[in-house]
Image: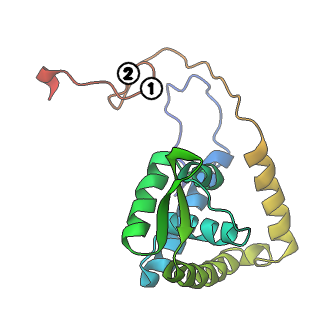
Amino acid sequence: MSERPSRPTNDPTNAPTPGPTPGFLVWRLSMKWRGAVDRALAPLGVTHAQYSLLGSLYDVRRTGLRPSQRQLADHTGLEPLYVSKLARALAAAGLIERAEDPADTRAVQLSLTEEGREVAERAIAVVRQVMDGMLAPLGGLEGPGTQAFARELTALLEAPLDVSVDVPPGDVSLGASPTGRPSKKTKTEE
């Protein structure tokens, strides 16, 4: 069975489907990676998303800086609102401290607590084991195949995303408006 659905007969491109697209493969790898990390970190009571904040704070801690939630969002690639939610949960668990930024009262600075540092160190060790296992086909975490793969991913991440597309007119499905955003329901539709 193919992992990629076949194109409908009314597909305007009428292009053959040689296999999964790079975007589909990146998405699948991302989901596989996240699931593996979530399962491995569960005994520590930390999710993959929480780990991304803890691990980043652990790295930044060595420089002596206290990043703002916004800086951490930029670093991790997570939405600022999601970072705020994660930071509140980690603060409630006693793993990080949130403090008003003395230079900007609208900003919140984040730092690890002692318990957060200990959990981060344990989590980093666990995630390294997961990564080494997942990257075994490329020679493991330190293998030359992994290093080449990391360079290619970095190049893709650093490339500007100035993609404009022309969406052909047609039927809109799944409740989306012609702009691609979910349409608002009227009272009669609810």
Q: Could you say whether the residue bearing mark 1 is in a helix, strand or loop? A: loop
Where, by quadrant of the figure, is residue 133 drawn? bottom right
| Image side of residue 35 versus residue 143, left or right | left
* Camera-side residue of 147 and 32: 147
In this rendering, the answer to whether 80 lies above or below 57 is above
Where, by quadrant of the figure, is residue 125 drawn? bottom right
Instruction: Mark 1 and mark 2 in contact? Answer it, CB < 8 Å.
Output: yes
Q: Residue at position x 61%, y 67% from top?
A: 57
Q: Which mark is residue 53?
A: none
| Image side of residue 160 versus residue 44, left or right | right
Q: Position of residue 21 (x, y in %)?
A: 65, 46
Q: Could you say whether the residue bearing mark 2 is in a helix, strand or loop? A: loop
Spatial separation of the CA atoms under disc 1 and disc 2: 5 Å
* Camera-side residue of 10 and 78: 78
In this rendering, the answer to whether 135 lies above or below 15 is below
Residue matched to label 1: 180
Residue type at tag 2: Ser
Q: Position of residue 74 (x, y in %)?
A: 62, 49
10 Å crowding of disc 2: few (<14), some (14-19), many (20+): few
Residue matched to label 2: 177
- Which residue appears farthest toward the left when viewing the image? 188
In this rendering, the answer to whether 57 lies above or below 3 is below
- Which residue appears farthest toward the top when viewing the image? 169
Q: Residue at position x 57%, y 57% from top?
A: 28
The total of numbered circles placed on residues is: 2
Residue type at tag 1: Gly
Q: Residue at position x 78%, y 72% from top?
A: 138
